[in-house]
Amino acid sequence: MSGYIPNTSAEQQEMLRESGFSGFDDLYRDVPESVRLKKPLNLPGASSELEVRRELERLAAENTVYRHVFRGAGAYRHYIPAIVDEVTGKEEFRTAYTPYQAEISQGVLQSIFEYQTDICELTGLDAANASVYDGATAAAEACEMCRDRKRSRVLVSACVDPKIVSVVRTYSFGRDAEVTLVPEKDGVTDMEALASLLGDDVACLLIQHPNYYGDLEDMRAAADLVHGAGAKLIASVNPTSLAVLPAPGEYGADVAVGDGQPLGLPLSWGGPYVGFMAATEKMMRKLPGRIVGQTTDCDGKRAFVLTLQAREQHIRREKASSNICSNEALCAMRVAVYLAAMGPEGLRQAAVQSSSKAHYLCEKLEEAGFVRAYKGCEFFHEFVTDSPRSSELLAALKAEGILGGLPLDDHRILWCATEMNTREEIDMVAAIAKEVSRS
């Protein structure tokens, strides 16, 4: 499968002549001879579709696919209604085209508008975008939103997912901006340490709720401290949890970010996912990427357009606050279709089942000798256990085709349960844990 160019050699020569070139060598005459390719690339020859399919199937067979999964840490296995694939699999939606031209993009624009509306309802904030790759990128972009000439330092809770912290640091390095970690205390952000770190140079605090350890943070206290110092609060949230936990807008977050993966996107070995961002009306013009607005056309009919584009790099490149300009429309549509199919009650049931099953799993593991690390904290659907037999337990689970929690170190495991985990699965994990404890 090579040489897929949709024109003939004769057509290529005609195009070269029309452009004033005698051949391909003439086309590249300004490229120094020293850097030109003198021989074909060392690539395998062309293969038929059947041969390629067989090779891909052979490679796929090397993957380990677990039937039972108790791991989250940022990517979660939830039930996806069949209608999500049915609707978003339609040919007219499967495009990477960015909908600049509203007159030929009404369907795509409406799907983005519906997605933005859903995110605003979930987060309790005023405006949302649809252009961010994943939750970590959304968090980093939100930090950039909050910076200005007087306030450039970013505080990040040590209880934020390390992958997110890494992306925030990378963004900040490029702008020569400082990132300071707020220490953890007993599985949550140390509020006393936060108060001591706040100053006139602090732009914002990034805090995760539920945090990386699954524990619930005191978001109202964090908001009061941050706003009292004149800074902004960025809440990194699990969207499923918002069906049962207070929305970021309720406790005063200025920006809410997260990964839309739990809302209708399969794990897919890490992507593609979609990051969501929502902000208050005061912060709306600083949101990066695409924002779709609703309007009326010349006949008074409902219509959709890309709006507030004066802040974007393709309009004001030298003054743009972000370089995010991607098209996440297909992933965003999956989120919108998932939420429409589930409805408020369906999403609440998924959240309640996830939380109740995680608490049942925690109870059973503690009975087996794998005690919860942060007992003083409430948790949603993830939690940490601490035991010297942790590595042995994960190995024993793997031998039975079960993907256990994520090992944080030699002793601690970060566990997760969703509505996809059955009581029988949990009891099986507990039985294996008891055997490991007795051995």
Image (cartoon, rainbow, N blue to C red):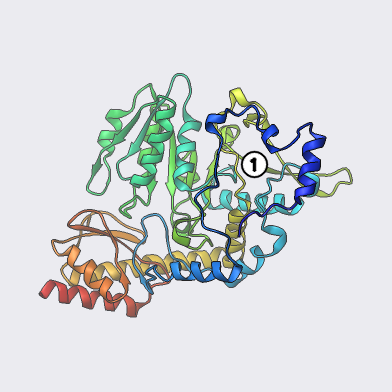
Please indicate whether residue 399 sits to the left or right of residue 303 in the image. Answer: left
Residue 162 pos. (x, y %): 33, 45
Residue 332 pos. (x, y %): 59, 54
Residue 229, by quadrant, is top left
Q: Nearer the viewer, residue 75 or 198?
A: 75
Q: Nearer the viewer, residue 153 or 272?
A: 272
Please indicate whether residue 153 sits to the left or right of residue 112 in the image. Answer: left
Within 10 Å of disc 1 (Cα), the crowding (few <14, some 14-19, many 20+) is: many
Please indicate whether residue 379 sits to the left or right of residue 106 in the image. Answer: left
Disc 1 residue type (three-letter): Ile
Looking at the image, how many numbered discs can be counted on the residues? 1
Residue 244 pos. (x, y %): 45, 59
Q: Nearer the viewer, residue 96 or 405?
A: 96
Q: Residue furthest top?
A: 150
Q: Nearer the viewer, residue 178 or 278?
A: 178
The local secondary structure at tag 1 comes to loop
Q: Residue furthest right?
A: 299
Position of residue 224 relative to residue 217, above or below, is above
User: In the picture, which quadrant includes the C terminus?
Assistant: bottom left
Q: Which residue shows up at 55% across the image and 63% down it? A: 344
Position of residue 347 relative to residue 239, above or below, is below
User: In the picture, which quadrant includes the N terminus?
Assistant: bottom right
Query: Which residue has dot 1 on it?
Result: 291
Q: Which residue shows up at 62% across the image and 46% down it? A: 327
Q: Residue furthest left?
A: 439
Q: Which residue shows up at 60% across the image and 43% down it? A: 326
Residue 117 pos. (x, y %): 62, 50
Position of residue 243 relative to residue 145, above or below, is below
Residue 92, by quadrant, is bottom right
Q: Which residue shows up at 45% across the image and 56% down it? A: 270
